[in-house]
Image: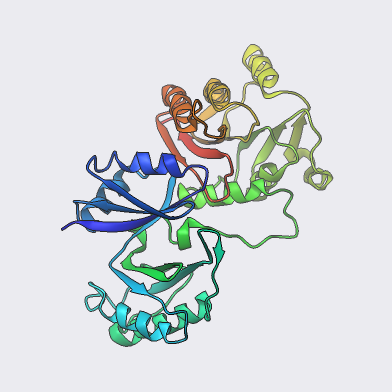
Amino acid sequence: MPSTFLVTSSDEFEGAARQELLRYDPKLKLEQTLATGLFLVSSQLNWEDFAAIVSQEPPIYARHLFPVQATVSLSKTAGDLDKLAQAVEGLPGLAALDPSRPFGVQARLVEVQEGQALTYPYTPFAIKERLGAVIAEKTGATENIREPQEILSLVAVGDTVYLGLSPAETNLSSWPGGMRRFAKRPEQISRAELKLQEAMEVFDFSLPTSGLALDLGAAPGGWTRLLLEAGLRVWAIDPAQLDPRLAQHGHQLTHYLGMAERYLEEALADRSRQRAFAVIASDLRMDAVLAARLVADYAPLLSPNGLALTTLKLPHESAKIKPARLAEQALAILHEAYGVVRARQLFHNRQEITVFLKKS
């Protein structure tokens, strides 16, 4: 049975997100753009089959998707909540929802369409409260907004609402629109920490609690701080100074005041300096292909069971420059050095993607 679903991506990589979805279904129809980074797609495959194919090789640029099982026209009055409640009661699969599987309601209101500011007389919280009560009453399931196993997704764009109920694992992210948010901690050094935190969730890994770690392009030291916090001894490589708060870690931190290329050259030339790193992390500000080559060259310093994480900075798209193609070239280089290569454009990424690597 054909299906329609709503896809979220970053504004910059919307074109790449559209194109990569075609590999799952070459007959996919790219429907209208509802807002920047938010568009509808239709497939001849049913939602379950399409989601199963996607789960085998998750996309890089599409952050979130859900099946559109109902649409509701809004009048921008309080009565809209009654209309939404009725639509939820009629969703396919609601009656069969397993009461032992906790659910969550995710609601997004897109306030601007075609340059016109739109005002809704209710908040996303009010929508979630009303519709959550409907699901609980009809199914007996318990709401768990932090770790939902079933998700009712709702996106309002202008005067139209798109609704769908689906297992969390089929949506690519259990966060609304794939927008993972973390509370800011007093000890946070830089925004880059959020990328590492999100990467651990998206790629489902934890940092080792002991061993050695290498942080390339470390300054001011956000990733270094998280590596130290995990229990690792860190070599931070950067010609710039680190945040002074990191000095408290004493001998657990070594700062090599120089370029990553130079450190690698010296390490490979001197056997006494060759260490087996449990983690190699790189957030270098350089061209994606050059960064990939450098991280590939660092592979001999990674322990057999170690992991690596790198960002790949990409240019803005233009008629001549296609960042997704440059990313493909960079990923091909990494595939030559690592057995496991998984890439995603994270919510906390800007003009870049993040890549998780292992030797095998």
Relative horizontal placement of residue 301, taking residue 191 as reference (left or right) = left
Q: Compared with residue 159, is residue 168 higher up or lower down, i.e. above or below? A: above
Q: Quadrant of the C terminus?
A: top left
Residue at image coords 62%, 15%: 268
- Whole-percent x, y for residue 72 in the image: 34, 74
Query: Where residue 237 appears, x then y in whole percent?
Result: 71, 30
Decide if residue 269 is in sight here: yes
Residue at x-position 65% and y-position 18%: 267
Name the side, left or right, on which 236 lies relative to 58: right
Where is residue 78 shown, x and y percent of the image? 47, 86
Using the image, determine if residue 316 lies above or below residue 190.
above
Residue 175 can be seen, yes or no: no
**Total count of labels:** 0
- In the rendered image, the quadrant that contains the N terminus is bottom left
Residue placed most toward the observer, 269 or 141 = 141
Where is residue 336 shown, x and y percent of the image?
A: 42, 22
Query: As rendered, which of 342 and 319 lies closer to the eye?
Result: 319
Q: Quadrant of residue 27?
A: top left
Would residue 205 be found to the left or right of residue 90 on screen? right
Q: Residue at x 68, y 60 (%)?
A: 184
